[in-house]
Image (cartoon, rainbow, N blue to C red):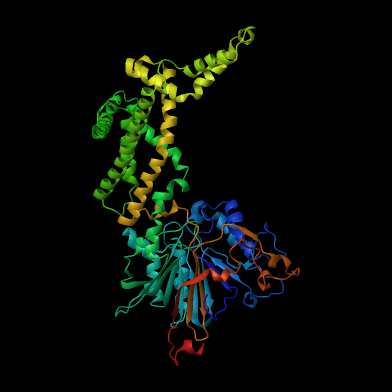
Amino acid sequence: MIPGLYYPVENYYLLVETSRYPNPCSFTYERRFFCPFEYALQPPAWYTPDHIALEKPELPLGVSELRQYSGPQCFMIPGNHDWFDGLNTFMRYVCHKSWLGGWFLPQKRSYFALKLPNGWWVFGLDQALHGDIDVYQFKFFAELCQQKVGEHDSVILITHEPNWLLDWYWGDKTGKNVTYLIREYLKGRCKLRMAGDLHHYMRHSCTESKEPVHVQHLLVNGCGGAFLHPTHVFENFKECYGNKYETKAVYPSYEDSSKIALGNILKFRRKNWQFDVIGGFVYFVLVFSMFPQCDSYRILDEDSWDGRVNSFFNATWNAIFEILEHSYVSLAGVLTLLTVSFFFVPTKLSRRRRALLGFLHAAAHITSAVLLMLLMELGIEICIRNHLLATSGYHTLYEWYRQAESEHFPDPTGLRARLEQWTFGLYPACIKYLMSAFDIPEVMAVTRSTICRKGIESLPRGGAIIYYVSVFLYFWVLSTPVVSMVFGSYLYVCINWFHIHFDEAFSSLRIANYKAFTRFHIKKSGDLEVFTLAVDKVPKEWMLDPDWDMEPKEPLQMSHSRRFPSKWRAASGWSDPTSVVRVVDQFVIPRTPVDPLSPDSAS
């Protein structure tokens, strides 16, 4: 915190990114959006969740007009996820409700304009799903600039997407209506453009230039997002609106962002265990046609370790060429993987580099799958050679059981024979086939031996299915850690070397830390102070705040006027929340000098 500076409850709370993630359904709005705000500030006692506001603003009790209300208010613009249902849920839960927890909601549309003291304005623009405003919004804000915004006023323009960063990254030009509004109507009065969408904090400020400055500061703060986005992929951003910009603040830092990406190698599988289902199946399809490897014994027949290693890698190359020349199922899997790998590479790279990177990615998976297949076949061969697996029949375990049973539990009265007769043979048959079902390695060894001696055609359809299912179960367990590591390594290389896959590489890590929010304070002089406060590590366990619970509550008292307005607090290690909050950026935007003889000075 900044010594000597007090942070009261904000008068205006501005939401500039999708808060209804991942989809705008009623559950998402009620449980993931409204509920946390109600925990922070409880709504008034007369508030009912099912109420639909027809004529907004529905002013609180004892307030005759909006400007008399001194409590916190909330304004928000929809993000891309809010538009997935055509903005229906946003309109119902935001534009036709009056309270977001203890924040008053006077907003009627998906966009807004706020006039603040000392010549400051806030424009909230709805970009929908195409990164730009429609002509109706353009007309509204253009007329506002002409008729209401003074020549020496200053505007904070808020959009969901940071077009300046994304357009630079993708080599695109979007938001033409917004750009035209800034250039031709605001004409240098846009002091700050702010956006969310990217889940990090970055601020760029315009360098001194003889050219007209259209926007002084570009600020991205999406740190309230569901996961963290990298900052280092945008490190080389320098120009926008024909002006040069320099980086003033980033959170997390470029170095930390690059180090965080290493988690894709070490943590990808732990964070994305569902990927095992797909990855293990894909690897099995890649080598399906290669089971069994009847010549794997030749690797073990080599006299030296050098010979075994050379023979192993020769077998690897032979298996890959066998897939390409003679297989059907595995070849289809290889071609599918190559195609998917090419189209998975973002279009930011040239087609040639996409093809090369996609090929290397697919080749790493194919090689890994073949190596694992050979290792598994060698493991079975070693077990057979050391008499750990039998190849004479499918019921070796049952025969051992019957032998041990007859030795240690003799049956002179013939009880077992009578049980077999009374159960119509089910008694020994059930035990026999259950043991065979659980002795999967023996099934694999016996069937493998049969295929190698007589060919796959000698097996009945059911026997072949049982063999490949047995192989799949063991191969899936063997391959899932490898496929996750290969894919995680691919993401790490792409995000740190090529600066691509910034969404996939960091969403896979599911990082809930590095939260930040930006606060504004208009000084008496008209200058705008901007503070961004951050928490590096967020608490995972919460408890009911005893101070909130013990504080007397009057029936009609607004929650923001209480000493302890928030219902929950961190369970441990957070006795003083201010000790873990730090300022990561602080700057001042001076008020535009006003000519004493101008009309703005008189007002």
Above or below for 428 versus 252: above
Residue 236 figure quarter: bottom left
Q: Position of residue 345 (x, y in %)?
A: 33, 48
Q: How many marks?
A: 0
Q: Position of residue 303 (x, y in %)?
A: 25, 28
Q: Report x, y in % for residue 168.
A: 33, 62
Residue at 68 percent across and 59 percent down: it is 51
Viewer-proximal residue, 460 or 33?
460
In the rendered view, tell whether residue 250 sits above or below residue 414: below
For the residue pair 48 and 353, the one nearer the viewer reads as 353
Give the quarter of the image for residue 299.
Answer: top left
Residue 547 visible, this angle = yes
Is residue 465 shown above or below 428? below
Q: Is residue 138 in sight in this rendering? A: no
Quadrant of the rendered image containing residue 598: bottom left
Residue nearer the viewer, 105 or 346? 346
Front residue of 137 and 454? 454
- Where's residue 352, x and y in %? 24, 48
Residue furthest bottom in the image: 597
Q: Is residue 246 left or right of residue 148?
A: left
